[in-house]
Amino acid sequence: MHGPDFGGEVRDRHYGQLEDVPQAPDQVASRSQNDDFDVTVSESSCPAKIKNFCFKNMDWLRRVSVEPALLFVMVSMGLTNGVSIQYVQERIYENFNITSASGGACSNQTSEPTDAEKAAAAELNGFNVISGFAGGFPALFVTLIISAASDRVGRKLPLVLPVAGMLCGTVVFLLIALLDLPVVILLISNVALSFTGGYPLFFSGCSSYVADTTAKKDRTFLFALLFTLSLVGSGIASISAGYWIKGGSFADPFWLSFALLSSILLYLIFWVPETVRADSKSSEDDSLLAEPRSSKLSAVWKGLSGILGVAGKGRRVWLLLALTVLFVSMGVFGAINSILFIRLLSMPFCWSSVLIGYFNASKPFINGLGLTLGARYLTKCLKDYAVIQLGLLSTVGMLVIICISTDTYGMFLVNVVGCLHALPPAILMAKMSKVIEPKLQGALFSLTGTTESLANLLGPFLLGLIYQGTLNTFPLAVFIVMIGLTVSTMAIVGVLMIMECGAELGYHQLHDDGETEDEEGEHMGASQGEANGDIK
């Protein structure tokens, strides 16, 4: 059987007669009866012409689609996110007449921070919290609406729009850094550019695209691959960004980011093929024109309500609990990144920009390695829920290390202990993608993208408030709260395991991702009559 096709094959979105849909011969021969129908991208499309001309005899490269875009978007974000925080820190410290020592963030290496350092750290944390909240709130609704609408208007909109917004944000920072404009402009630009969706919308678009172009049995690993690319991409640029900052240049990383985002934007427009067929969209639009206008405007809501319509199949509670696990795990994950960054820049660590760069680079590479190997091998010998529990246990371990570490070596051990903490979101999204029917994949990932956006908004905001309130008394309190939240999430996953395994609830498992293709075919043939009632 051929491997998963990234962009060479796309799923048909026409909901009419399936017998008229042209199918690729290799897919027809290997696809089970209840798998999704795929169709070939039109050879007359611009992306197909460019691919066929440039890489005529390189099929493996022609199949790559959104993966390079995701990788380089994360490289761009890795260049800019940490740099922007340290730039704001430098501007705030200047206001308090605090000078950096040997590239570090502290004015001295005494055992106790001064009042000025405490005030500067509190203001920096407050700026971070306000910026994240003001910038994340509009993106919450944009991700929900545009990702759900992509089932009708196509997948390119949630891919192109956030990249264009990131490009504009890069230009704004360059103007602030070069012209020495007030940093409050960053807050205003974050709010304005959040209406383009940002990273949550872009990742939601990538997830929908992968779900469109892959079979169900491949999705667990491929979603883990997406998360791995997002982690590795952010780490590639961290070391170079640290040396740039040490050299006193905040603008240079943003110039490179500008070049990368410009190239990605052109790549997405002219290279990546659309997975929602034009004839399907026009057919749906014609049918919608015959309906009342209110029905057309409520199409997005119908798609979202269709996600929760699995209640009739006995899976609504499962889906809501899975979204809860996703929300808490992503909220804690985002809060760890932002709060730990502030803690490492402050007493007693006082890390330099170069050391921050090495830490930020090692974290995604170690996490990406754990995510890829965990999704590939752990899922072959353990149930998905057991792997999720291991990932959550890894999160608890890294939080404990943060609480007890007082030196640099201990903090680098945090990345090793937490190497599996990115597994739960990837596996949960893959499982939810298998539950929801193909025509609602965009609506599903609008829901998961909104959940992720809401988690990234409320998690760092609420936990950041706790950190700011206890900064001068007990700064480790927020990490203890995170441990409690993660343990509670493990209990919810235990409930999900009971729901799926309990015979009294009528849940049955289709097959494990680790099964061979022949075993999967046997299970699929034996359970076609029960497929609508399965969880996985």
Image (spheres, rainbow, N blue to C red):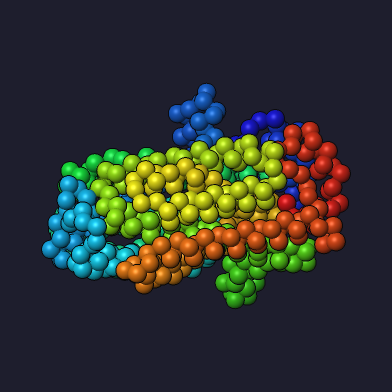
Residue 457 can be seen in this image: no
- Asked whether, in this view, residue 186 is left or right of residue 366, the answer is left
Most extreme residue toward the front is: 111
Residue 289: image quadrant is bottom right
Q: Residue at x 52, y 51 (%)?
A: 397
- Give residue 319's position: percent from left, percent from top: 67, 62
Residue 392 can be seen in this image: yes
- Give residue 504's position: percent from left, percent from top: 85, 61
Most extreme residue toward the top is: 57
Q: Residue at x 35, y 55 (%)?
A: 341
- Give residue 532's position: percent from left, percent from top: 79, 56
- Give residue 487's position: percent from left, percent from top: 58, 60
- Asked whether, in this view, residue 489 is left or right of residue 21, the answer is left
Q: Which of the pair 325/398 is nearer the observer? A: 398
- Asked whether, in this view, residue 531 is left or right of residue 85, the answer is right
| Relative height, residue 516 to residue 230 (above, below) | above
Q: Residue at x 42, y 53 (%)?
A: 404
Q: Residue at x 66, y 30 (%)?
A: 2
| Relative height, residue 68 to residue 500 (above, below) | above
Q: How many badges with numbers are in the image?
A: 0
Q: Which of the pair 222/107 is nearer the observer? A: 107
